Image (cartoon, rainbow, N blue to C red):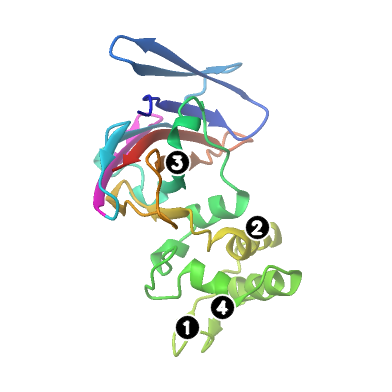
Amino acid sequence: MVSGSRHLTAVSAGAALALAIAFPFWGGRFADVSARIGGADELPVVKITAPANNSAYKWNSLVNYSVVVTYQGKSTQYQEIPSGEVLVATTYVADLSKRAGETAAAPLPAGLLEIARSKCVGCHEFKATAMGPSFAAIAARYPDNPASIDTLSRYIREGSTGVWGQGSMPAHPEMTNEQLHAMALWIVKYAADPNVNYYAGTEGAFRMEAPATPGPNGGLILTASYTASPADQKQDQRGQDTVLVRGK
């Protein structure tokens, strides 16, 4: 049996300190408190409202998820924060019992953060074909090397026509070289990872899937994150919530 553990964190993506405290209480579950040290600025609060932490679902079944984000008096519940800026990820783990005590997921890679905050997901899905090719399909075509990164960076900045069928990609001249490089780098390195699936939005469904035959303790780590870039702050402000979903 995998013991339940849930961790909701609010972090600043710079030198500012954040404290995530988990208080155990009866029933073997955890209550979560997030606070910031060294400043009174409010950080985004992200809460996965479904599925429940440590819940179990059959492998290959669809599981509905729901996320609520609040920040500076605004909420995704009232469309005051764009739901498309919330990034949800499922990561397959062969043995969840070894991950139950973790307090936080790693910060988002810079390239993935730029993709989540841009309009990329309006035309591209992470692994499914939409108006444009999926990021996983792009990674399959372009190997992880400097030439591929340069090519993809140029396509993002200048746009392209006829690279993927008859479709066209609009130009994004407003992006900096650093943003372009980070996005292209993430695509070629990580977009095709079979253990991880990504979704944009506060509501949707993910599939309980494993890249290989799952073991008895296998499951998914479900993570939801939101990053704000307030004009009066030097660092991005990020909130994140994580739950464990067991396979059966």
**Residue 226, labelled with which disc?**
3
Residue under pointer 2:
182
Residue under pointer 1:
168
Going 33% across and 15% down the picture, which residue do you hit? 28
Q: Does the magenta stretch include residue 69?
A: yes
Q: How crowded is mark 4: few (under 14 residues within 10 Å), some or many (20 or more)?
A: some
Circle 4: residue type: Gly
Q: Does residue 183 appear in this view?
A: yes
Q: Nearer the viewer, residue 231 or 160?
A: 160
- Mark 1 or mark 4: whose residue is earlier in sequence: 4
Callout 1: helix, strand or loop? Answer: strand
- Mark 3 or mark 2: whose residue is earlier in sequence: 2
Callout 3: helix, strand or loop? Answer: strand
Q: How far apart are marks 3 and 2 (CA)?
A: 18 Å
| Quadrant in the rendering for residue 4 | top left
> Which segment did they paint magenta?
61-76
Q: Determine whether 30 is above or below 26 in the image.
A: below
Residue under pointer 4:
159
In this rendering, which labeled residue sits more in front, label 2 or label 1?
A: 2
Q: Quadrant of the N terminus?
A: top left
Q: Residues within 10 Å of mark 2 (few under 14, many from 20)?
A: many
Question: Residue 203's x, y, as percent?
Answer: 27, 48
- The answer to the question of whether label 1 and label 4 lie on touching residues, with beta carbons closer than 8 A, is yes
Query: Which secondary structure class fits the magenta region best?
Result: strand
- Mark 2 or mark 4: whose residue is earlier in sequence: 4
- Mark 1 or mark 3: whose residue is earlier in sequence: 1
Question: Residue 134's x, y, as percent?
Answer: 45, 70
Q: How crowded is mark 1: few (under 14 residues within 10 Å), some or many (20 or more)?
A: some
